[in-house]
Amino acid sequence: MKLNLLAQILLIFGCHAPLAHSEKSILETTHSWYTSNYEKIHSEIKDKKSMHASAPIVNSLGLMIELNDGAILAEISGSVSTVLVEKPALMLSWFDNHPKSLEVWASFVETGFLSAETANEAVELKKLRQDTIISLRRVDATTTSARLLKAFENSDVRLID
């Protein structure tokens, strides 16, 4: 299963590099891969033993942040937070190299990510928020981790009517 996921990731990135795809096409392809493999992606992220496919997953999430259109940003933010909880060094390293995307996502955390449509979703988001804060407090303090910690500490889960 992990080899298949890694092969799919490499196929996506292999197709992007030599071809002159538009950003929209790249975003659509990456998003399609993400939605089709959501369960596998989360399984890989949460697997403490494996780092093989995690780096390409982080690159894919980062690419979607970089090329975001708003709706996709909302869709992937739970996965980004999960990486920050499970494998924080990978996501923080990506953000270190993409400061504009860091600011886009941190601002989104402060303004919209923690909005829930149901009480159950609110409970899940509160737990993810708290787990992310704990994780960011445990890592060595950097400008990147401090910015994300501030974003999560200054936000709260909102239940949308």
Image: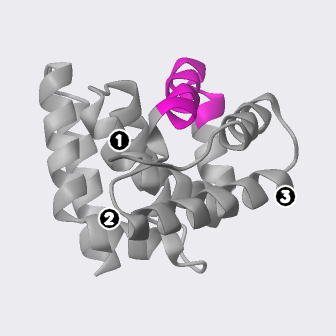
The residue depicted at 35 percent of the width and 37 percent of the height is: 73
Q: Residue 93: where, in percent of width, then height?
A: 65, 41
Q: Quadrant of the N terminus?
A: bottom left
Q: CA distance from mark 3 to mark 2?
A: 29 Å
Say what secondary structure mark 3 lies in: helix
Residue at numbered disc 1: 74
State which quadrant residue 22 falls in.
Answer: top left
Q: Nearer the viewer, residue 19 or 67?
A: 67
Q: Residue 21: where, in percent of width, then height?
A: 13, 23
Q: Residue furthest front?
A: 161
Q: Closer to the observer: label 3 or label 2? A: 3
The residue depicted at 47 percent of the width and 61 percent of the height is: 122
Say what secondary structure mark 2 lies in: helix
Confirm whether the magenta stretch covers residue 159: no
Disc 1 marks which amino acid? Ala
Q: Which residues are magenta?
A: 95-111
State which quadrant residue 92 falls in.
Answer: top right
Q: Residues within 10 Å of mark 1 (few under 14, many from 20)?
A: some
Q: Residues within 10 Å of mark 3 (few under 14, many from 20)?
A: few
Image mark for residue 138? 3
99, above or below 41, in the image: above
Say what secondary structure mark 1 lies in: helix
Return the disc, 2 or 1, that comes first in the chain's sequence.
2
Q: Closer to the observer: label 3 or label 1? A: 1
Q: Is residue 99 left or right of residue 161?
A: right
